[in-house]
Image (spheres, grey):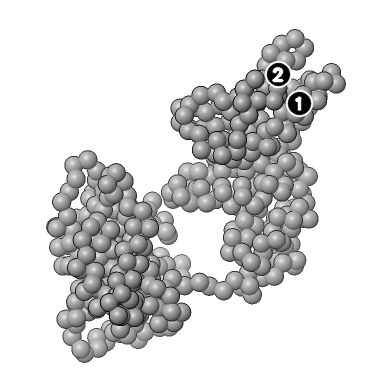
Amino acid sequence: MAKKLTAAFVNTVTTAGKYYDGGGLGLCLRVDKTGYKRWVQRVRVNGRQRDLGLGAPPVVTLAGAREQALEHKRIIARGDDPFALRREKRNSLLFSDAVQMVFEEKRPEFRNEKHAKQWFSTLNGYAVPKIGNLSVDEIGLQDVLRVLKPIWQEKNPTAKRLQQRMEVVLTWATVSGYRQGDNPARWAGNLSELLAKPSKIAKPVHHPALSLNDAQRWWTALKDRDGMGALALKFLALNASRSGEVRQMTWNEVDLTSGVWTIPASRMKAGKEHRIPLSNAAANLLNSIERNSKTDLVFYSSSLKPLSDMTLSATMKRMHKSDLDAGGNGYLDATNGGAAVPHGLRSTFRDWAAERGYERDMAELQLAHVVGSDVERAYRRTDMIERRRAMMDAWQRFLDGAEEQKIISMGRVQT
């Protein structure tokens, strides 16, 4: 008899093959060459050996697969055919299966694999354990509340995303013919009457930003650091960019002749192409990097893959610790007292731009934020790239401590 599988093995195995679970249930975990896993139970019905599909991890856990396999054995023992029973319920769909089906349908919509995994893991981690075995046409308001209430107060941002994703799954189930009636996961006029409004619960958590008073000594300390992580952090600071935009940057996005870095829409949070004017310092930094013929990435790890977000964060943490060890105060957010992080550098730049009198729209465009109403955006035909270039040159001079002392008046700052 085969040795019983463990949950840890099911979660980590990637080698293609068939892995049998002991216990006489005929349960097997099949892993294909792509790493995709699925549960299969081999049974004998009316003298014929057949395979029953039981779903796929992680939606169907080892315990869940065993429970299904045992139930099929009971059905066969009493003389019934589990295949026939399935056919009778062909219009019924479990919530766990619906999650998997919607996930596969929506996968092309996600900007990257990380966002796809987050969408799936939220549902799989909170909703599936409680209502995964319910048919989508059975799920009601109380079932949705059973999922949301335990985390609504303590983890409201996560709970709100969970509510939205449950609503998507159940809407899909309705239009696909698996359920009828109102969507019990709908917020407006439904859950909004039973749960506290997120705005009354969730307190926005801002990324700790580098104080303007510390910016120049921080920049001086960073310029003394070597390594690909430090280079990426310097480039991020010079352009006030997001970490992911820099870490996944490729040489074919850069035109050093015109001094423009064009980030494709597929890599932007707003889903729209974004042009960044390269200051002299940013262009010189890129020219100093030796290109690797084995990858088109500008900033890459030892395995020739994009740097991890932790690489940049770790560089800032080490800088903070080094300053503390030298008797300094470190690099802290002036408001919340937290140690500054890479994403907070965008706030530092935004504060600098406001203090120096740069137009709000121009600074927001540099940060790739959505500016103005739909009508205003429809009529705007420029992204102010050359004016932003002058602004980013001034930002670089500020970091280097060579900024002119007079305030640049370029319009009223809107707060």
Q: Is residue 277 visible?
A: no
Circle 1 residue:
72
Residue 340, by quadrant, is: bottom left
Q: Are marks 2 and 1 in contact (CB under 8 Å)?
A: yes
Q: Is residue 108 depicted above or below 360 in this figure?
A: above
Q: How far from the left and from the top, in percent, is residue 139? A: 76, 48
On the rendered image, what quadrant is the C terminus found in? Answer: bottom left
Q: How many marks?
A: 2
Circle 2 residue:
43
Please state which amino acid type lies under the numbered disc 2: Val
Q: Which residue in the rendered view is the most extreme toward the bottom?
A: 406
Task: Identify which residue, 287 or 208, lies in the foreground.
Answer: 208
Please state which amino acid type lies under the numbered disc 1: His
Q: Is residue 97 left or right of residue 311?
A: right
Residue 223, by quadrant, is: bottom left
Q: Which residue sits at x=55%, y=35%?
A: 9
Task: Identify which residue, 14 or 243, lies in the foreground.
Answer: 14
Q: Which residue in the rendered view is the most extreme toward the right?
A: 78
Q: Is residue 266 depicted above or below 198 in this figure?
A: above
Which element carries disc 1, helix, strand or loop? Answer: helix
Q: How far from the left and from the top, in percent, is residue 303? A: 29, 44
Query: Callout 1 environment at 10 Å: few (<14), some (14 to 19), or many (20+)?
Result: some
Q: Is residue 145 visible?
A: yes
Q: Which residue sits at x=21%, y=74%?
A: 220
